[in-house]
Image: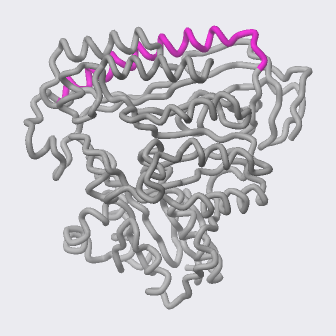
Amino acid sequence: MKENTVDIISLGCSKNLVDSELLMRQFTANGYTVRHDPAQSSDNIVVINTCGFINDAKEESVNLILEFAQARKTGKIKQLFVMGCLSERYLDELKKLIPEVDNFYGKFNWKQLIADLGKTYHPELANERALTTPTHYAYLKIAEGCNRTCSYCSIPIITGKYQSRMMEEIEAEVRTLTRQGVKEFQVIAQDLTYYGKDIYSRYNIAELVDRLSDIEGVEWLRLHYAYPTHFPLDLLPVIRNKPNVCNYLDIALQHSSDAMLKKMRRNITKTETIELLQKIREGAPGIHLRTTMLAGHPDETEADFEDLLQFIINQRFERLGAFAYSEEEGTYAAKHYTDNVAEELKQQRLDRLMRIQETIAGEINEAKIGQTLKVIIDREENGFYIGRTEYDSPEVDPEVVIAKTKSLETGRFYAVRITGSQSYDLLGTLSEENFKN
């Protein structure tokens, strides 16, 4: 067993990943050797950053903690710490359930871990991270928490009220990362569109993105997790006019049926949703929209679900994910509704929805054949280069598979002519054009 080594394992969303990267930087500043998500762990210290969003994520977190608790018990690792959303929500229960864990931390007090190890927390490095992503892109978290009251969602219970970061602090972080070679930023928050309301008394996401786009070295900014109610339309000219703001928006809609939208407490109607989508597409022509849908919410009828399917067919979202309703204790739905859609039916509906979306995505991809697109190279794999367009976020969106006719560099942009398509991915060859990098 090596001394002064630590393995950090991140579960859940990219917002959790940013917290892990911040913690890793503090460990390296204290002389530790740090690994992230290693294939096999047998080190001095293991830190598990947990997710507590839905049942599957909670189960994954608990099972992993139990696995490492056994390793701690048998001496394979020296110390085990747990942080993140699961321990933020179930701290007392976890302490009783898994006493082998040396200490539990929530989502916001993980800095105490450094002090508890007898080391120094470096406030001057508070916004510096040890990136776990490829060096050319990073996630940029601009806020924590959520003020929405959606019936099914436990996130406000875990994270509390919305807390925007100051613009100057975010800009400073971006400048630091661009100096390290980062070119592409995935701008993330639980609700991007609420940004600034708590500290500037108005929605400031448009101004923030505009300011970030002016920073030298920023090649792509991509926006994740907008909310449709009170959507700040002044964001659309920024997307349209700033060449380094990707023509992409992740906006979770969850449903289309008015009955379900009301049950879900989304504070928007189907008509208002359709009008908003039209304004977005008119305000930023060619934009690719990613959305998320929820199947099997309490009292979802077959008519409600058919309404959702027709909505998806009509709107033809370029990117779409979906999940089945999972009752989360403490939420409005858990308190006021009965989870009365059978699990088997939830899964059937989810499968039907995604089959329709696969067809739509395939048709949208086919329409790109013959186009030349700007592509960033993420990696080389099985004799091909794998890249993404401005319409594709890492991990969740399609990729471009490029024939290896010339040597390409990871993290650089190239002009790629699209020659074919699959259900979700594109096929391409290097174009004679080129981009400045």
Q: Main secondary structure of the magenta part?
A: helix
Residue at x-position 34% and y-position 70%: 70
The magenta region covers 343-372
Judge from the rendering whether residue 249 lies leftward or rightward of residue 180; answer left or right. left
Residue 165 on image: x %, y %: 51, 60
Q: Residue at x 50, y 50 (%)?
A: 14
Left or right of 332, for residue 150? right
Residue 275, quarter of the rendered image = top left
In reply to whether residue 348 is colored magenta, the answer given is yes
179 over 372 or under it: above or below: below
Q: Position of residue 435 (x, y in %)?
A: 87, 32
Quadrant in which the C terminus is drawn: top right
Task: Quarter of the image for the N terminus: give it.
Answer: bottom right
Magenta span includes 309 = no
- Say which of 61 and 21 sits in front: 21
Residue 302 vertical placement versus 409 (above, below): above
